[in-house]
Image: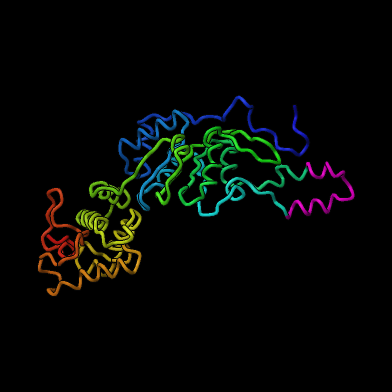
Amino acid sequence: MASPPGKLSPQVTDEAKGERYPMISEQELRAGLDKAAYVYDDILITTVLVALKLGRPILIEGAAGVGKTEVAKVLSDVLDRPLIRLQCYEGLDESKALYEWNYQKQLLAIQVSMNRDRDEDITRSLFSDEYLLERPLLKSIRSEVPSVLLIDEIDKSDEEFEAFLLELLSEMQITIPEIGTIRAKTQPLVVLTSNRARPLSEALRRRCAYLYLPYPSVEKELAILQKKMPGLDASLALSVAEAVHKLRENDAILKKPSIAETLDWAAALEALGITELTADALEQTKGFVLKNNEDLEEISTLMDECDCGGDCGHDHAGHHHHHGNAAEGSHDGHHHHGNAAESHLHHHE
């Protein structure tokens, strides 16, 4: 049966759940990630391939700054899909995530049509595409081509909103009271990220393929630096990777440096023409890797404990437990003599 004039038509038949994404081979996925300079491991490759094959959402958890959002952005490029992003926050509701009606335009239409059309015709025409404002969720399932839907930081939203998502994730459909059920015209690849600010429901977890991203190892962080900044001095890149690793291990550091801050720090050092991570270099550029005053003061305290100008090569961390995290002198066989930043940040032994 045809829909009434002005009323939204169902996007696909009841039997369909939207066009699934064309499959991509493991070799194509790896090649695409390499081209995007994204450093990955086999677990990520397997999770993405299985999620694509089964049409499952991917839930990615991990600390802030480990590259969860970047996964969705890179997959958008690799799969040649538009990226549609919903940034979650406390108090997020359906009107901001799903749709809104353009009330001002509706009121104007009522005034224009008041003496010309029947009431039922006016009412019916007001709930049509012309007055519908698509928000990310609706936009993703009404897209003419399959998209990547990024639901970022789902743990910041309320439990009520999380429950609302279940219909979309389970059935690939959305219900709008004025219209009815709209099924997906194309099926988006859904990527949800969480910083674990609150526990997510078991119902949501069951519907998703799961991926946990820890902070990268020194080797992985070095590989990221080399891919993102191929011109960076090799010795400096290693020193930066080791330094950031130790800062994250330091319990006194409140805001652990993210991968983006690692890149910012390396870029700042390179811009200043610095090729060795000395105490002076650390002092000049610490604001690029540590982004709150308490952490900056913590590092300054360590630096102040040394009264030899930073060139003695000894451990000056005193009783500060785990005050490590700049270029450690020895890591996997790499030894750096005279690294002043290492002397200041190495943990007390």
Q: Is the magenta stretch mostly helix, strand or loop?
A: helix
Residue closest to the eye, 131 or 28: 131
Q: How many labels does the image show?
A: 0
Q: Residue at x 32, y 56 (%)?
A: 263
Question: Does residue 256 appear left or right of residue 77 in this picture?
Answer: left
Highlighted range, magenta: 104-124
Task: Please tell me whether residue 199 belongs to the stretch shown in magenta.
Answer: no
Residue at the farthest right position: 115
- Which quadrant would the C terminus be assigned to in this image? bottom left
Q: Furthest residue to the top?
A: 15
* Residue 184 image position (x, y, % from top left): 59, 34
Q: Is residue 260 above or below residue 138?
A: below
Asked if residue 157 lies left or right of residue 289, the reply is right
Establish if 316 lies above or below 25. Answer: below
Picture quadrant where residue 327 is located: bottom left
Query: Quarter of the image holding residue 337?
Result: bottom left
On the rendered image, what quadrant is the N terminus found in? top right
Q: Position of residue 45 (x, y in %)?
A: 35, 35
- Image point 54% across, 46% down: which residue? 161
Q: Does the magenta stretch include residue 120?
A: yes
